[in-house]
Amino acid sequence: MTGQAEHETQMADRPTLLVTLTGTDRPGLTSAVLSMLALRGLDVIDAEQVVLRGRLVLGVLLTAPRDHKELKRELKALAENLEVDISLKKGFGDNEPRRKGRTQVTVIGSPLTAHGFAAIAGRIADTGANIDRISRMARYPVTAMEIAVSGADPDSLRTVLALEGVRQGLDVAVQPGGLYRRAKRLIVMDVDSTLIQGEVIEMLAAHAGRLEEVAAVTEQAMRGELDFAESLRSRVAALEGLPESALDEVYREIELAPGARTLVRTLKRLGYQFAIVSGGFSQITDKLAADLGIDFAAANVLEIVDGKLTGRVLGEIVDRAGKATTLRRFAETSGTPLSQTVAIGDGANDLDMLAAAGLGIAFNAKPVVRAAADTHVSVPYLDTILYLLGISREEVEAADADATVD
């Protein structure tokens, strides 16, 4: 028998005592309970504590004392003094350690109804998996909950919960648990209708008086009904003769997606690197990258001669395949394994990029993109992506407050 196996056998045969405290939270409760247990010389095997709306739940798993009845009397007296409830339960081993197959499920709703949340929990149970922990990631402008699940196959669970999420009108993300979620990663994001609201080419077309025809072609291309490269050439041709100054005017008109600055600012603080890859134009994306502090940017280049757009693009077009190639190039340049990249997009030309990334997120995307991505977000707040990465709104606000003080 190996040392590890022998240790596990010994732990499984070891008598334990689970002490559970519930009551109104206030300073000193946890300390009082642990101090009493310390007088008995007991070993702590496991402990968990949560406070919800001022109510404390504390669980401590201990090596069982020789006389647990005496300890029970002492804890009962302590409970009366502290005005809380304390219960004891005898057992053996590490209190049924969590099953293998750790998975993180993030549920986002606006609102998150009890009926919808119950449905998600029910589907998790149907797969034979167990919910180990639930924690709130955000309470506004959306409600986001993170569920730690054990004993599940992530791919199977993703399929089941994706269908239930659609039925309940919820966004549900399923990701393998473990250390990878804490790694510093590379975020690669589409620009039009993702990082920013609207499509730059349509804004330019409006200045050229060709909005209606260009918008119709854009919609078909984003749904995957037209070859992107050909659709781009035809749309850019409609811009022929537009003065270069229109690019500056359009840039001033751009509105970022709600939460865009928060997303970039927060992840940059944590050491993430950011990239934007666009089927739009470098004359716009380079300025966005400089404004937001984004590390890498790639887009098509509009040809400009004598201060006017010629209606052509220079070099290779950043199309569907080009976006995936660019993601791989940025990952190599930044020293990031592909498994640690996150891609975010909304259109059919983002599909290869989403598939190449370790995590592909469809953001307010077309149906074909939602169906193919690892997960999707259908609320208009880009910083909701943070919750999928295990970062809560409270942590974001605390970091912003600290930065203001500094």
Image (spheres, rainbow, N blue to C red):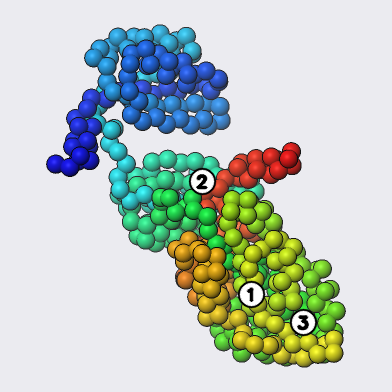
Q: Residues within 10 Å of mark 1 (few under 14, many from 20)?
A: many
Q: Of the residues under marks 2 and 3, which one precedes in the sequence?
A: 2
Residue 106 image position (x, y, % from top left):
49, 51
In the image: residue 391, left or right of residue 39: right
Circle 1 or circle 3, nearest the eye: 1
Residue 347 image position (x, y, % from top left):
58, 74
Mark sitting on residue 205: 3
Q: Residue furthest left?
A: 1
Question: Mark 2 and mark 1: span between their CA atoms?
Answer: 34 Å
> What's the residue at 30%, 9% (across, down)?
70
Residue 56 image position (x, y, % from top left):
49, 26
In the image: residue 240, left or right of residue 177: right
Q: Of the residues under marks 1 and 3, which one precedes in the sequence?
A: 3
Q: Say which quadrant the N terminus sits in.
A: top left
Quadrant in the rendering for residue 139: top right
Front-lying residue, 191 or 84: 191
